Image (tube, rainbow, N blue to C red):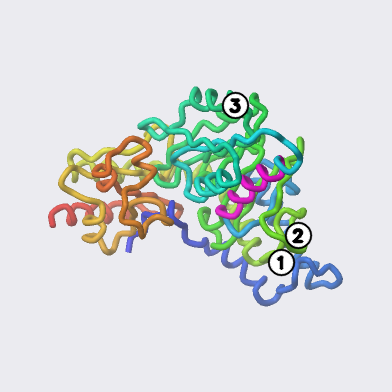
Amino acid sequence: MIYLDNQATTPCDPRVLEAMLPYFTEHFGNPHSSGHRYGNKAAEAVEAARAQVAELLHAQPREIIFTSGATEANNLAIKGAARHLRGWGDTRRRVITVATEHKCVLEAVRDLAQEDFDTVILPVARNGRLDPELLKEALQTPTLLVSIMAANNETGVLQDIPALSALVREAGALMHSDLAQMAGKLPFYSEHVDLASLSGHKIYGPKGIGALYVRHRPRVRLQPLFSGGAQERGFRSGTLPTPLIVGLGVACALARENMEDEAVQAAALRDRLFGRLAEILPGLEQNGDPAHRLPGAMNVRLPEGLTALDMIAHMPDLAVSTGSACSSAEIVPSYVLTAMGLSAEEAARSLRLSVGRFTSSADIARAAEMFRDAALV
């Protein structure tokens, strides 16, 4: 089977798994038990991983908070920041995000609307990018927080985070970015944001672990989502899962070491695949800005007369998708694509394909053959 759905999840790198295994058995101590060697060994591993995550984001280790994944990190950043500022008497109520954000961001912002926050969801252009002028206009009202993802989970389209963040900071608001798709694929510098989320399973690490960057100077404060033992600087209580954290750290280190070469390889394979598909399927088009997207990401619109679900059904040995993994069970058009101006019919003809670290040239050739055979059915 050929796997071209790396935006949904990536396989755990064998080197990551190897690093994790001893912490399930040999080094099984609780990292919060500092009175013996078992606990100390686990605590040391956690802090080493924290440093590896920080290095990937060009941040400081103390600015990294471990979470269960990007969904929790996004909720903690958005709700935690807004509620903390309100609790300290801040009279601003505006929270801004973008229509093509991941559902966990959109739902977190909508939850705040139920708490009498003034929530604004900005539209995007046909290419999937946010017009800075729209953000600038929305920021005319005193704003608490802006959340804009660095790279979209369906199209791979990149937002200009440095430029957008400059507008946000000029307005005196906090800037959060969901890095689940971008982290480890392209360089990111934490200096551009106040809060940033990432997920282990998007960068060849384990599922069930993620991290939130929380700027230390000037300090950003958050209200925790739940009560507990005040671990992770009081932001996120609960016993830390040492094996998963070790895996996330190694995944971040590998991504940092190999990012440049992997980006070149992924882009080359993606472009080769699109070229072959364009020959096989005349009229094939790309969704989203082709000049500003992740190296391995591609979202294509099939020619009229073909539907994405039918193509998938006729390619049982090829793993591709119609949109984000969290929405794959819904028989509705992709909200990301319709927010970009595509019709429901156009969205129904769209497929997400994404190459990754373990995709080979032979995989691309075989995938193209599968498309050719499916189109003839």
Secondary element under disc 2, as helix, strand or loop, is: loop
User: Is the C-beta separation of discs 2 and 1 under 8 Å?
Assistant: yes
Foreground residue among 51 and 238: 238
> How many numbered tags mark residues here?
3
Q: Nearer the viewer, residue 339 or 324?
A: 339
Q: 26 left or right of 3?
A: right
**First in sequence: mark 3 vs mark 2:** 3
Q: Is residue 287 left or right of residue 31?
A: left
Name the spot of residue 35 as percent of width and height, x first. 86, 71
Q: Which residue is mark 2?
A: 231
Question: Of the residues shown, which amino acid type is indicated by label 2?
Answer: Gln
Disc 3/disc 2 C-alpha distance (Å): 36 Å
Q: Which residue is mark 3?
A: 141
Q: Position of residue 343 (x, y in %)?
A: 27, 39
Magenta run includes residue 273: no
For residue 374, what is the image quadrant? bottom left
Residue 301: image x %, image y %? 27, 42
Q: Is residue 370 left or right of residue 21?
A: left
Above or below for 106 versus 245: above
Write the start and end of the magenta stretch as one range.
Answer: 70-85
Q: Quadrant of the N terminus?
A: bottom left
Q: Residue at x 25, y 52 (%)?
A: 308
Please name the amino acid that badge 1 sits on: Thr
Give the CA separation, mark 3 to mark 1: 41 Å
Q: Is residue 361 above or below residue 274?
A: below
Mark 1 burial class by Cα count in 10 Å: few <14, some 14-19, many 20+: some
CA neighbours of label 2 inside 10 A, class few (<14), some (14 to 19), many (20+): some
Q: Is residue 75 magenta?
A: yes
Question: Which residue is tagged 1?
Answer: 239
